Amino acid sequence: MAEIVKPLGATKKKVIVGRGASSKGRACGRGHDGQNSRSGGGVRLGFEGGQMPLYRRIARRGFSNYPFKIERQAISLAAISHAYSDGETVSDETLRAKGLLKGKDEAKILADGELDKKIIVDGVRVSASAAEKIKAAGGEIKTVEE
């Protein structure tokens, strides 16, 4: 049975820099001159060469309403017309059950497409033009129109 042998050049000796000029040529792998070439040189973490560092440029105080932001998912009248039958009620629960509304978002019905069925909208926001189309088809809205 043959032994497995590493190919030539597979392992290299670790280069230890900063041990004099003979270590790895004139500058020992640290480049020519400058702050980083010197022993003990270099800059602290986050230093940007005198420019105001990022952690100081960004405000660290104040209130953000982002965690309480309410996202609304747009749902077209065409999608509602396809998913619902005549006389059904459109609500957040039924939209989730039919797969039209996902996540914790709220829904808003927009007037994209045509509606040829009588539907009842309950507890869902509706745009003004969508409300006109729903009422024209004989439907009913039980929410504040937007």
Image (cartoon, grey):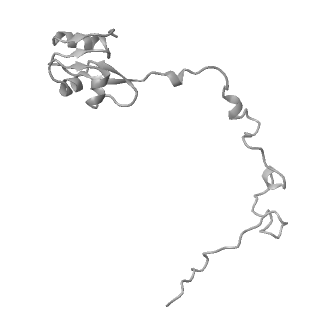
Q: Give me the residue at 78% from left, 64% from top.
A: 17
Residue drawn at (70%, 73%) of the image: 13
Which residue is more in the foreground, 100 or 136? 100
- The outermost residue toward the bottom is 1
Residue at figure coordinates x 61%, y 20% from the top left: 63
- Residue 115 falls left or right of residue 109: left
In the depicted view, which residue is nearer to us: 75 or 23? Answer: 75
Image location (x, y in percent) of residue 41: 82, 51
Above or below, 115 relative to 2:
above
Q: Quadrant of residue 126?
A: top left
Q: Measuring 80% from the left and 55% from the top, which residue is drawn there?
A: 37
Point out the image quarter for the C terminus. Answer: top left
Q: How many marks?
A: 0
Residue in the foreground of this view, choosing between 7 and 65: 65
Residue 8 location in percent, x, y?
Answer: 60, 80
Q: Is residue 144 above or below residue 104?
A: above
Q: Is residue 44 above or below residue 82?
A: below
Q: Is residue 88 above or below residue 26?
A: above
Residue 137 % position (x, y): 16, 13
How far across and how far down the image is residue 56, in percent?
A: 71, 30
Location of residue 22 (image quadrant): bottom right
Q: Nearer the viewer, residue 22 or 47?
A: 47
Task: Indicate the quadrant where residue 5 lies.
Answer: bottom right
